[in-house]
Amino acid sequence: MCAIFGVVGEVERDLAVKALQTLAHRGSDEEKIYEKEGLFLGHRRLYILNPKAHQPLEREGKVALFNGEIYNYKELKALSEIEAIIQSYPNFSELDGMFAFGLYDGKKLYLGRDIFGKKPLFYYKDESRFVFSSEIKGIVTYLGQKRFNPKALSGYLSFGALPDRHTFYQGIYKLLPGELLEFDTHSWQISHKRLGSFLHVEPDSLEQAILHAIKKRLQGDFPVASLLSGGVDSSLVAALAKKEQGSLATFSIGYEDERYSELPYARLVAKHIGSEHTEVLFGKEEFFTTFEKLLEHFDEPIGDSASVPLAYLFGQIKKQGFRVVLSGEGGDEIFLGYRQYFEFLDLLQAKNLKYKNWLKNYFRSHFSPNKEWEWYKRIFSDELLFRSTCEVFTDLQKNLFLRQNLRDGESVEYLQPFLKQWERSGFTEDTIFMSYIDMVVRLAALYLAKLDTTSMLHTIEARTPLLDREIVAAAFGDSRRAKEPKFLLKRIAAKYIPDEIIGRKKKGFSYPHMQWLMQSDYIQRMERINDEAGFFKPDQLSFLIENAKRNRFSRHFWLALAFLLWYEKNF
């Protein structure tokens, strides 16, 4: 795992070096710089595989650098991962892995990102320079200034993160998953192409695809550890990694309050598979210390409260010397693990009601701030119903909450790049559409960004085996996928993990952070920041706080809190 940073055009070397150093947490083993007139390319390396594969690498008139892993570099007959990127020029579609890369051929700069969006890449362009970086802080440091993007707040409130190219900084954008950016240094123009998509792969045996995905992600010169929550996804990943690697260290996080802790389930799996298991306890003191650290480190608001214990857990894993950790992201989205998918499938049936106009008028004249009202209103108004299971504020809730007016349906704007891809994919099934939207919104924009940021804070490479194009193809190609939640995955997992884990009721991730927050001065802090900045209507913010004390609208509350604290730190 690494960090990449580059400037094309007018280069201020001292600032470029300083910017690269802000990314040192992503790679502490080596720093290399490639320079010539009008070009600066910098690389920070976390050594995982092949100590002689230094970057940036110059070959055949091209120079390249990347962050991540190319799992099929040997199949491409390359001596190293970075050479595979150069050999795959100019379309790069053969690359299989988690990566973000830059390649300069003397005329154009190419930036690419893997199809799932596992590795981040940001860019900025003005009339004299094009800058790219693995994290926004590199670009901000180089520019020496930052401007808040007010439009970003609405998208963040909708999804907890911005799924499209925009960021919270004016002029700074991100590559979308599976996107190839071409920057022509003569015309000074940017164009975007598709590097690939997980919607266009021939299906194979699901079990073989999962086994192959695990095996690919065990490559490297260091032992691989695994996160273990006690759910089906992480348990299956850990079980297969233990089987393939021979030995495995697993890590779980828990809480003194047993209502929240899933340590007994993780303990059961660890005993079953024979892993070397470590349990980490996370309490009130660790929460506030870690939260403050993340407020300093995150480039954008912390859209998921689970980021805090996850960052703490990675810190404990780092102390034991591990560089590579497996995680179970993707199982719920690919295999329909959330109950909401089936609720939406039921709701979609209402589209076929012959006499629904009066219902449309009824819902518009009988407003409710609850999300269920919004869902029915969309159905009867022929609007896009499903906008991700991580949708938090509806557009109408945002209109109540924000000191600005938003038009109805505004949140769909943030999904437009993906809706266009969907239209070209040839797929039509509702269940595949929901999985697809969640994979580019809930996963790429929120969960994978969280995983990358919290793991790289501690210079750890996090790998997600279930997010593999072969697995997605096999799952999407099986008509039994929507029989019940995780039907396909559980059939396979039953061979490797205890029956108690297969049959247990799904429990959403939670921990007592709301209780801790209500006992702190953070409530007064968020009210003071809002009084000064004026983003939210004071009475609506008070409504949110009072309801959060009773565990209602808790996700809404977290997004408001995290944004206001982040804004104060940065602007």
Image: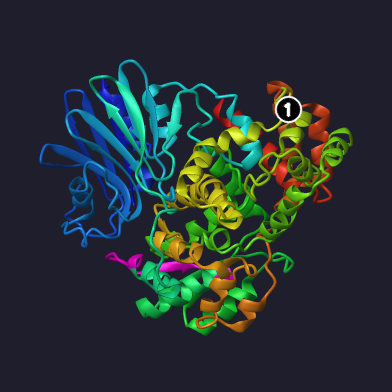
Q: Which of 423 and 172 is in front in this view?
A: 423
Residue 537, picture quadrant: top right
Question: Visible in this render: residue 17?
Answer: no
Is disc 1 placed on a helix, strand or loop? loop
On screen, 462 above or below 566? Answer: below
- Which quarter of the figure has residue 532? top right
Q: How crowded is mark 1: few (under 14 residues within 10 Å), some or many (20 or more)?
A: some
Q: Quick check: 195 left or right of 538?
A: left
Residue 233, quarter of the rendered image: bottom right
Image coloring type: rainbow
- Residue range in magenta is 216-232
Q: Mark 1 points at which residue?
A: 402
Image quarter in which the C terminus is found: top right
Residue 433: horizontal and vertical position, in percent? 57, 51
Whether residue 228 is in magenta: the answer is yes
Seen at 39% across and 39% down, the residue is 121
Q: Is residue 274 visible?
A: yes
Q: In this view, does 528 lie above or below 460?
A: above
Confirm whether the magenta stretch covers residue 427: no
* Main SS class of the magenta portion in the image: loop
